[in-house]
Image (spheres, rainbow, N blue to C red):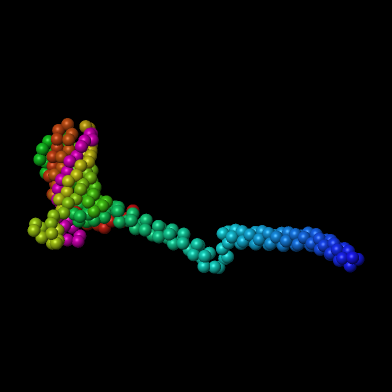
């Protein structure tokens, strides 16, 4: 009987001891788990901060002098500017040139004889001596200032468009050595009854050689009377200079 009572008490004591042990161990395990989780979260946060810092640093890298990136960045704008500076003057020189040769031949200055065909209100309508010229600007356009000397000297300033002739049936052949033109401008009559009027002009240039060009033209000035003159002359060729 005493033995049974002893075993029951022993079993009760063991049960209490087990409960005590379990009660003391659970907080320790929970504390251990909480500590581990906190450490892991801290490590993850530090890792993310380092990754973000590296990303920001890589996106805002300042080129180091002497490296390939720095050299190429410095050379690229200079190359573009040099191309622009060299191409612009070439284009300008190819477009316009004072005294340049046109499709009708070289620019020239010369003398001519004027034969009055109609009118007589100015020197253009009478027989007089003339100074003629042609100053090319492009391959097709030129200005042809001239002066008909006389009692009422007339200055003629037409702007002309030059043509060229090709031999019929052979488009690959050279142009014929004849260059017609048409033009319009102003006629200025001097003297007691000075006037400025419309001028219409047309003619032809015939290159004779590298030094001379023959010219024949008809000029009509619409003063109070319409004066018409026919001029025949020769000019001395000269070269132009670009602008």
Q: Is residue 43 left or right of residue 12?
A: left
Name the dominant secondary structure of the magenta segment.
Answer: strand
- Residue 197 in magenta stretch: yes
Q: What is the tally of numbered marks visible in this picture? A: 0
Between 82 and 136, the one lying in front of the other is 82
List x then y, in percent, for residue 27: 78, 59
The magenta region covers: 194-215
Between 87 and 140, the one lying in front of the other is 87
Q: The N terminus appears in which quarter of the rendering?
A: bottom right
- Residue 74 in magenta stretch: no
Does residue 223 appear anywhere in the picture? Answer: yes
Q: Is residue 75 left or right of residue 177?
A: right
97 above or below 73? above
Between 178 and 109, the one lying in front of the other is 178
Does residue 234 appear anywhere in the picture? Answer: no
List x then y, in percent, for residue 135: 25, 51
List x then y, in percent, for residue 118: 10, 38
Residue depicted at x 19% and y 39%? 199
Looking at this view, name the residue that lies furthest to the right: 2
List x then y, in percent, for residue 171: 13, 59
Q: Name the quadrant containing residue 183.
A: top left
Residue depicted at x 15% and y 40%? 220
Residue depicted at x 28% and y 56%? 240
219 above or below 55? above
227 above or below 19? above
Q: Name the quadrant containing residue 122.
A: top left
Q: Is residue 159 left or right of residue 23?
A: left
Looking at this view, name the residue that lies furthest to the left: 169
Q: Name the quadrant containing residue 11.
A: bottom right
Residue depicted at x 40% and y 57%? 84
């Amino acid at each position: 009987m005493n033995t049974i009572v002893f075993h029951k008490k022993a079993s009760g004591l063991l049960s209490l001891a087990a409960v005590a042990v379990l009660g003391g161990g659970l907080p320790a395990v929970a504390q251990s788990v909480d500590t581990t989780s906190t450490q892991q979260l801290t490590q993850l946060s530090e890792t993310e901060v380092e990754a973000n810092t590296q990303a920001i640093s890589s996106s805002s890298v300042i080129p180091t002098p002497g490296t390939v990136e720095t050299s190429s960045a410095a050379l690229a704008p200079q190359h573009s500017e040099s191309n622009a500076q060299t191409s612009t003057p070439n284009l300008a020189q190819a477009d316009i040139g004072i005294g340049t040769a046109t499709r009708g031949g070289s620019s020239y200055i010369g003398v001519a004889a004027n034969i009055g065909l109609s009118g007589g209100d100015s020197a253009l309508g009478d027989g007089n001596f003339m100074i003629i010229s042609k100053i090319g600007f492009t391959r097709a356009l030129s200005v042809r200032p001239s002066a008909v000397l006389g009692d009422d000297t007339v200055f003629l300033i037409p702007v002309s468009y030059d043509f060229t002739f090709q031999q019929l049936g052979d488009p690959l052949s050279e142009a014929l050595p004849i260059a017609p033109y048409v033009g319009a401008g102003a006629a200025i009559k001097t003297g007691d009854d000075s006037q400025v009027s419309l001028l219409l002009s047309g003619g032809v240039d015939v290159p004779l050689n590298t030094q001379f060009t023959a010219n024949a033209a008809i000029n009509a000035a619409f003063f109070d009377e319409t004066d018409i003159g026919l001029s025949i002359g020769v000019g001395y060729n000269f070269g132009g200079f670009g602008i």
